[in-house]
């Protein structure tokens, strides 16, 4: 049975996030031929609408207000609930991002619905969608179905392929006036993280360091390599505990769970709690002085050696590839 | 301040996971307080020490969670409540847990409710915001610092590495992110004292709920382990030729660069 699906799009610094396009593709898998309506909340976001159409949205609704310039769960919930009131969809798809994680449980609770979070793939069984998600931070997987009410999911960035962008697709972009009332939480200040650019959860390439990095300065070559490859820097719990880097970089069962195309582990032994957070990466490279290190058991390619010798050489070689 | 902490008992992070009869096998596994909930307990105790009041730790689960509740009491919480659903609830999801907690909390006049931002087993991170929504109080997730000044609360939260400073007010629900504090280990006197602290056990009946009220909205139909990864290739030779080979492999074979 075809279903109308609302997909929440997200923009950051004036550009749509990739996960929004992935969410449209996820919506299509659930919709069974039904309409995909993408919702964009913010201030001055209407010009982004056409891009959502190019990625497969049938229609786009923007909710704009000065009060929605920055995300707040109060503001966004009011905006989105106004849309849901009008549209009565059968399903909802958000990205499993900071925003999606914060907002989706509230909306689900308000609607009295279930919510399947952090979905990494969508299958089908007898015409109904089946959602695959990691549990125990990727040590296992579960398949879930909705038994009652709305189909509501959040999808993990970087796992579901977006549809190809086609400028020839057409769809209406409309705006909805929502009266945004008092916000109970007010953002006073935002300090951007030191490592700007790519977010860990969305990065295609991650260069991660463990205790072997030895110091805060030791992360510099890793950062240079990550920048060169358009990726992000991550770390093990050991490196964070030793204060070589901020906890926001931690990958593992406590910390972030990531699935980049390429994971380069430097001076990282491969504790179970760390491996849970990265072992589902597509290609894993391990660089470690200790040939017995656990990390080699999950690595596709390994170099036994000192990361401070290997990483600078890697930077040189990658530069050659980039130049050619 | 009247503070409530939401706590879950989880597998130790060092445990390997195996499956028997379509379920996660827990024979002989070590269980711990969900690490993010440990930050929540520590923060609650620190806030109580600074502002006075009482800390109650509440968990939805079975008899077995008593051990972790005692640990929370040994850390310094004043009271613990186990909402034992073992006999009443066959299947549950986050809707179930949040509904039960909200029903329990609705008449407790909590000033502050603290939970972990996510449990390391199910990993959905839903229960905190769901409970706040049902209690109609504001919430802030993934916090790394909190200061309470009368009714005003100033919070720093982690947003994918950025730090947002937020102003809000009590009553409030927050969820803990790593970096909020360093949870203490229970001291020996703490462990002795914990034995005498109240640990109440209640059931759905005591909350005027029946099984239908908390029936889950989603269902797990399969649990499986990820395919075991083949051991990869350890490169050989001089370091610089290994590096050259690696870059070629990533470029031509794996095609990721």
Image (tube, rainbow, N blue to C red):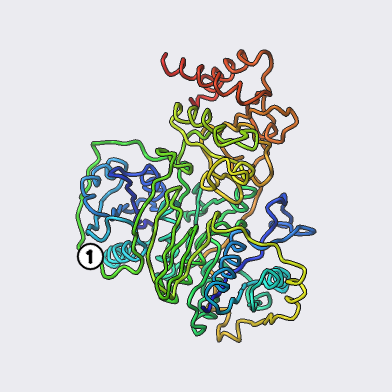
Quadrant in the picture for the C terminus of chain A = top left
Residue B29 placement (x, y as % from top left): 76, 57
Front in this rendered view, residue B172 or A17:
B172
User: Residue pushed farthest right?
Assistant: B28
Is A140 situated left or right of B147 in this image?
right
Residue A19 placement (x, y as % from top left): 40, 45
Give the letter of the chain under mark 1.
Answer: A
Please determine whether, in this image, residue B103 is positioned above or below residue B245. Answer: below
User: Residue at the location (32% across, 52% down)?
Assistant: A36
Residue that badge 1 annotates:
A178
User: Residue at the location (64% across, 79% down)?
Assistant: B79
Front in this rendered view, residue B136 or B186:
B186
> Hey, which quadrant is residue B36 in on the image?
bottom right
Quadrant in the picture for the N terminus of chain A = bottom left
Is B11 situated left or right of A138 in this image?
right
Please determine whether, in this image, residue A236 is positioned above or below residue A43. Answer: above
Residue A53 placement (x, y as % from top left): 27, 44
Front in this rendered view, residue B196 or B12:
B196
Q: Residues within 10 Å of mark 1 (few under 14, many from 20)?
A: some
User: Residue at the location (46% across, 18% down)?
Assistant: A319
Front in this rendered view, residue A271 or A32:
A271
Residue B211 placement (x, y as % from top left): 58, 79
> Hey, which quadrant is residue A207 in on the image?
top right
Q: How many marks?
A: 1
Please determine whether, in this image, residue A247 is positioned above or below residue B10. Answer: above
Q: What SS does tag 1 mark?
A: loop
């Amino acid at each position: 049975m075809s279903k109308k699906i609302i997909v929440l799009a997200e923009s950051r610094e004036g550009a749509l996030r990739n996960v929004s396009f992935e969410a449209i593709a996820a919506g299509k898998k659930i919709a069974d031929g039904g309409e995909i309506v993408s919702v964009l909340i913010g201030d001055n976001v209407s010009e982004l609408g056409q891009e959502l159409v190019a990625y497969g949205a049938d229609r786009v609704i923007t909710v704009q207000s000065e009060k929605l310039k920055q995300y707040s769960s109060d503001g966004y919930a009011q905006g989105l609930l106004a849309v849901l009131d009008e549209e009565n969809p059968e399903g909802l798809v958000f990205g499993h991002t900071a925003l999606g994680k914060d907002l989706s449980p509230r909306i689900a609770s308000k609607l009295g619905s279930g919510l399947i979070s952090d979905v990494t793939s969508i299958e089908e069984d007898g015409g109904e969608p089946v959602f695959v998600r990691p549990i125990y931070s990727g040590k296992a997987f579960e398949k879930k179905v909705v038994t009652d009410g709305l189909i509501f999911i959040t999808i993990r960035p970087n796992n579901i392929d977006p549809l190809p962008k086609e400028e020839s697709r057409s769809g209406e972009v409309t705006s909805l006036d929502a009266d945004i009332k008092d916000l109970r939480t007010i953002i006073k200040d935002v300090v951007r993280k030191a490592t700007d650019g790519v977010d860990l959860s969305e990065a295609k390439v991650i260069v991660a360091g463990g205790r072997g990095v030895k110091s805060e300065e030791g992360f510099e070559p890793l950062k240079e390599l990550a920048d060169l490859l358009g990726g992000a820097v991550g770390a093990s719990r050991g490196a964070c505990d030793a204060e070589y880097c901020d906890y926001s970089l931690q990958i593992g069962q406590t910390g972030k769970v990531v699935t980049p195309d390429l994971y380069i582990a430097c001076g990282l032994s491969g504790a179970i709690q760390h491996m849970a957070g990265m072992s589902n990466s597509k290609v894993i490279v391990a660089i470690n002085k200790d040939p017995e290190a656990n990390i080699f058991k999950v690595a596709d390619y390994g170099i036994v050696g000192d990361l401070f010798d290997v990483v600078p050489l890697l930077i040189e070689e990658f530069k050659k590839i980039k130049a050619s | 301040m009247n503070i409530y902490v939401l706590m879950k008992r989880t597998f130790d992070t060092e445990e390997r996971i195996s499956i028997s009869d379509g379920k996660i096998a827990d024979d002989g596994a070590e269980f711990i307080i969900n690490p993010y909930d440990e930050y929540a307990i520590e923060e609650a105790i620190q806030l109580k020490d600074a502002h006075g009041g009482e800390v109650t730790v509440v968990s939805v689960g079975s008899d077995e969670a008593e051990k972790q509740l005692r640990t929370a009491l040994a850390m310094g919480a004043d009271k613990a409540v186990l909402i034992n659903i073992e006999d009443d609830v066959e299947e549950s999801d986050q809707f179930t847990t949040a509904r039960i907690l909200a029903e329990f909390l609705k008449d407790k006049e909590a000033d502050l409710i603290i939970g972990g931002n996510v449990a390391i087993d199910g990993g959905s991170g839903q229960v905190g915001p769901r409970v706040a929504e049902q209690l109609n109080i504001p919430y802030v997730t993934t916090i790394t610092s909190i200061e309470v000044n009368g009714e005003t609360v100033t919070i720093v939260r982690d947003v994918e590495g950025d730090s947002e400073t937020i102003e809000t007010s009590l009553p409030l629900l927050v969820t803990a992110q790593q970096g909020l504090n360093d949870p203490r280990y229970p001291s020996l006197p703490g462990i002795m004292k914990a034995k005498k602290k109240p640990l109440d056990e209640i059931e759905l009946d005591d909350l005027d709920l029946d099984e239908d009220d908390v029936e889950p909205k989603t269902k797990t139909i399969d649990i499986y382990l990820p395919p075991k990864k083949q051991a990869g290739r350890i490169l050989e030779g001089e370091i610089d030729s290994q590096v050259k080979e690696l870059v070629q492999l990533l470029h031509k074979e794996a095609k990721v660069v």
